[in-house]
């Protein structure tokens, strides 16, 4: 790893820590015992990736009213965003299952998404997980997916990873 890559990795970690701290403050001070503190959902069972390693996906937080949400900031300005309300109903169903931690309709839901196409922001292996969005009339998993990041970001692809849009849960 070059020193430039190390600096970039360090900067990403610092920014992620700051985002986590601000989020904790906005959700009740960050002290798990405080009355306004967010409760973390129980983790779903570990799932296998394509290469046999296991990693448990982290459920996304349930949707809140726009007044309760902090200002949404896209993770990448290179990616278009899409309002959650503009997604097909099957994608909304999948997002609901992710928020609850399952159960999922396909055994490969929750596997590690390796971002081989590099269309999402670069992260360590195991950071992203993919979930099937049911395609009416398809005899298999189809081409539609929701991919989640460990920090809670969510992405939509209708064309089996050829393109992604980041899901904005505020609308």
Image: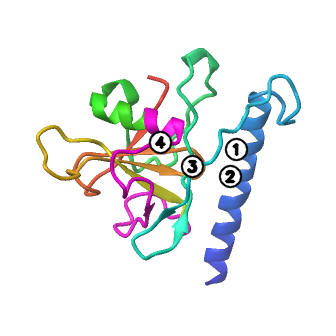
Pointers 4 and 3 in contact (CB under 8 A)? yes
Residue 87 lies left or right of residue 71; in this view the side is: left
Q: Which residues are magenta?
A: 96-125
Look at the numbered discs 1 and 4 and tell me whether their residues touch, using CB distance below 8 Å.
no
x and y percentages locating residue 80 in the rendered image: 36, 42
Q: Is residue 36 above or below residue 14?
A: above
Q: Secondary structure at mark 4?
A: loop
In the picture of the structure, the residue carrying the numbered disc 4 is 102
The reply to whether residue 91 is in sight is yes
Which residue carries the number 2 mark?
16
Q: Quadrant location of residue 11?
A: bottom right
- What's the residue at 38%, 29% (across, down)? 83
- Is residue 76 in the magenta section? no
Sort mark 2 into few (<14), some (14-19) or many (20+) by Cα contacts within 10 Å.
few
| Quadrant of the rendering where the N terminus is positioned | bottom right
Look at the numbered discs 1 and 2 and tell me whether their residues touch, using CB distance below 8 Å: yes
Q: Secondary structure at mark 2?
A: helix
Q: Residue, x 68% and y 71% (percent of image)?
A: 7
Work out whether mark 2 precedes mark 4 in sequence or the reverse, and give the earlier one: 2
Q: Which residue is mark 3?
A: 44
Instruction: Say whether marks 3 and 1 touch (CB < 8 Å).
Output: no
State the SS at label 1: helix
Q: Residue at x 25, y 41 (%)?
A: 134
In depth, the one of 149 and 102 nearer the eye is 102
| Residue hosting label 1 | 19
- Which image quadrant for residue 82? top left
Q: How many marks?
A: 4
Residue 74 left/right relative to 82: right
Q: Position of residue 48 (x, y in %)?
A: 47, 66
């Amino acid at each position: 790893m070059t020193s430039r890559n190390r600096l970039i990795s360090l900067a990403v970690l610092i920014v992620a820590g700051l985002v986590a701290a601000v989020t904790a403050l906005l959700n009740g001070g960050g002290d798990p015992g405080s009355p306004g503190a967010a409760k973390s959902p129980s983790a779903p069972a570990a799932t296998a990736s394509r290469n046999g390693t296991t990693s448990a996906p982290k459920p996304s937080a349930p949707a809140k009213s726009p007044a309760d949400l902090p200002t949404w900031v896209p993770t990448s300005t290179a990616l278009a965003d899409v309002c959650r309300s503009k997604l097909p109903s099957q994608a909304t169903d999948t997002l609901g299952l992710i928020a609850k931690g399952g159960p999922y309709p396909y055994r490969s839901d929750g596997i590690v998404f390796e971002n081989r196409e590099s269309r999402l922001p670069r992260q360590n292996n195991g950071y992203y997980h993919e979930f099937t969005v049911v395609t009416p009339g398809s005899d298999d998993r189809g081409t539609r997916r929701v991919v989640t990041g460990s920090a809670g970001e969510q992405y939509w692809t209708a064309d089996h990873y050829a393109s992604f849009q980041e899901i904005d849960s505020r609308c």
